[in-house]
Structures are given as structure tokens and as C-alpha cells.
Amino acid sequence: MKKVLYIVWDALAAMMAWAGLFLFRKLSIENNHFEDVNLVFQDSNFWRGIIILPIVWCLFYAMQGTYKNVLRKGRLKELQQTFWASVIGVIVIFFTLMLDDNISSYKNYYSSFLMLFVLHFGLTYAGRLCLTTHTANMVHTRRIGFPTLLVGGGNKALSIYRDLDDQAVYSGNLFVGFVSYGDEVNEELSKIMPHLGRLDDIGKLIEKYAIEEVIIAIDDDDNRKINRYICKLDGCDNVIIKITPNLRDIVYGSVKQDSIFNSPLITLNPRPMEEWQYTVKRMADILCSILALVLLSPVFIVTALIVKLTSPGPIFYAQERIGFRGKPFKMHKFRSMYVDAEQAGPALSKDDDPRITPFGRIMRKYRLDEIPQFYNVLKGTMSLVGPRPERQYFIDKIVERSPEYLLLHKVKPGITSWGQVKYGYAESVDEMVQRLRYDLLYLKNMSLTTDIKILLYTVLIIIQGRGK
């Protein structure tokens, strides 16, 4: 319901700002008399703006991520987001709809721009401020809250619960229970909330109790234990994960507080990039994959013919890989190996692999075998840039040594990646684990700028024929 109120108010604010601008221009800039105000309502541009602009604004806000998690909005962050969205939106409107108007002075352009910005930003933020303040008051007075699961059954978990429950401004955590790592459970904590299970039960509990937030508070600072919990939570949509910091985390700046009253917890962002960047990334994936399939169609046809003529078997090879949120999908490639190359079981390819055809070696060197994956990108099962998808067989082997691998399923797999640029095709599980470090770095530093850099390095590797 709150989301609907935000959308309705944003649309009304856009209408009122446009109507106010038209009245200002007709009555002030064009020096019409007040009795001629009806001329405003007879202007077709007025009605076009009233109908179209609210839709455009709301789509822009949705792309920005404004309508996600509306119950968790902060007023200062709302102010910042609304201000910059208004600046960008008004500039676009000014240059697309108003710059060709017949106005006697450039000062009138400036006054029109300023008037539209002040009206749009002022009206939009005024409504949002009321909605956000009302929501915040409902949270602080415990009328609404967020179902929370506490991970840890020891003294630290009890301390965190007390800290959150006694804080001056209630944060909205409604604890449904706790899960423990081992058999040791604090008796006092058991009296406060139910002991719901252990590590392996987390996924089922999140679904059963509609958990929105998980707080990890285990007594020791064993990173492997914490990683196991985090990896168990991988793929849980819209679940906010927080962990208790140690002194080192605080000194090195890992703990960033948004609120004066909240407990010091490290929030693990379930979405590595801002929402608008995901939208731009997906649009770039669609556009680039279409262009690649069209422009590379001659290479596509010639490669397909050579594959067919140089070795018996199908042209394409489809293999099941594990992708976004751990879901399997079929990844397509030009066949670079002989038919039935894996009769003895799954195996990674090597430089001198006898299973690879002579033309297959050339394809791999220049990454020609990857061209059909632009179809996967177009479908949305892959992206241009992202961690390379693996088979479940090898994922199981990697996870035995590095459970952090499961974190890569937070994003779509890609045709190329930071690890792929660094290592190329992995020839062993050891190399997969080494490559994992770079893919985790990508996850931490994921941005459109990083994607562009990886794509440029990939093109350079292809031109130089350094693929392996």
C-alpha cells in the first residue's frame, strides 16, 4: 500500500509542477492577463505534459529503485535521491521539450528551468517526506517491524538482542527466534525467543517465517563459520544480512553507521550495484548482444560451416551450468571438442587436451566458441560481464575448499569476467579456486565502469589471440 501511495504522489507532483510551469510562462513570461488563463488549458502541449510526464517520471524513479523497500526509507537519503533525480529529470525535460520555445530572452529560459526544478523537487519531496516520516514513526513506535532471525546461540547473540531491544530509537527488528551453530545454547536467550534450529535449517526458516533480516552474532570471530552462514543465505531474495563487527572491522572502516542510535552492525548489501545501474547493465546487454549477433553473423556462419566440415557431430554444444540464484540453465557454444569427449566423466580442458579438435584450438584462442552465448545474454540467463558459470560437479568441489564461491550466484554469470581475463579457461580445481579471488573482487567492486574495463581487456586478449 505504501508503494502505491509513493507512486500516486509522485505522479500528482509531476502534474502539478508541469501545470505550475505553464501558468508561470503564460502569466509572467508571456505577459498574458489573468482573464486569459484559459489559454493554458487550450494548449495541447499542456495536456501532453499532464498525461505523459507523470508516467515518464514514475518509470524513471522505478529505474532508480525508489519504490523498493519503501518501509526502510531514511529521510536524509530520500532528500538526496529526490534532489539528484529532480536535477537530471528537469534537465532532460528542459532540453527535449522547452529549448525550442520562442522566448524573448535567455533569462526567461533560466527562470523557466529554475521554476520547474523548484516546483517539481519541492512538491515531490514534500509528499515523500510526509510518507517517510509516517512510516518511520510507525516503526519507532513498534506498530510495524521486520521479521528477523538471529544467528548464534551464545553470549554475543544475547548481547546484540538486548542492545537492539533497548536502544533509544527502535530499529524495527521483530525477532522470531534464533538458530545456533553447534549444540551450545544460551539458556537466557532460549527463554526470550524460541530456538528454531541449526545452520542447515536457515533456508526453510526464512521461507516459513517470511524473514526480512538476518543478524549473524556468533561468539568467535572464525571467518569460515561466518562464511558458511553467509553462503547458506545466498539466493534468499530480499533478505538483509548483518554481522557483528570486531574491533579490527571498526578501526579499518568496515562499519558505516547511517543512524546515530542503531547498533554497530555490518550490513552486507544483497545487491552489489545501485538499482539504476542494473537497469543500464541489462539494457547494454540487450543492445550489445543484438549488435554482436548481427555484426558477427558472417563470422558466425563461417565458423559454423568449418565446425561442421572439420569434425563429425553437431555444430553447437549446449551444457547445463549453474547461474543466477543457483538456477541451472543451458549455456550454448560452438562445439570445440570431439563428440562424446566426456564419456569418462566431467573433466576440465587443458592446452594439450586430445579431446579438442584442431579448429577447436583456434576457436578457443580467439574466443570464437563463445559467440553463441550472446543468445544467452539476449535471453537474460547470462550477462556480458559476470563470473563464468560452472557445472554443479565442479561447484561442489570448489565449495568444499572455498564456500565463498556460492556468493557468485548473487549476480548473473557472464561471457567474460575478471577471473577469465586473468586466468582464461581453468585447467584444474586449483585454478578455479585461484580465479575465484578475482571473481569475488568483481562482486565487491561491481560497477558499470568495472564492466567496461573488463570488456576492453577481453577485446585486447581476443585481438592478440591470448585466449586459452
Image (spheres, rainbow, N blue to C red):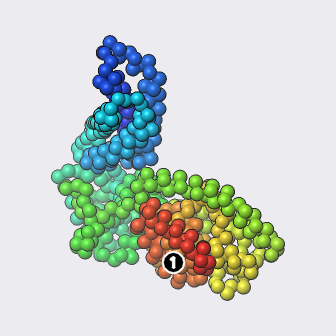
Residue in the picture at 34% in, 77% down: 222
Q: Quadrant of residue 30 in the image?
A: top left
Name the residue that disc number 1 marks.
Answer: 422
Image location (x, y in percent) of residue 360: 71, 77
Asked whether residue 104 appears in the rendered view, the answer is yes
Image location (x, y in percent) of residue 17: 34, 31
* Above or below 448: residue 17: above
Nearer to me, 55 or 116: 116
Given the current orientation, which residue lies at the most extreme left position? 168
Given the current orientation, which residue lies at the most extreme bottom position? 352
Residue in the picture at 42% in, 71% down: 441
Determine whether, in the image, residue 172 is placed left or right of residue 276: left
Quarter the N terminus occupies: top left
Determine whether, in the image, residue 58 is placed left or right of residue 216: right
* Above or below 386: residue 19: above
* Above or below 292: residue 437: below
Asked whether residue 232 appears in the rendered view, the answer is no
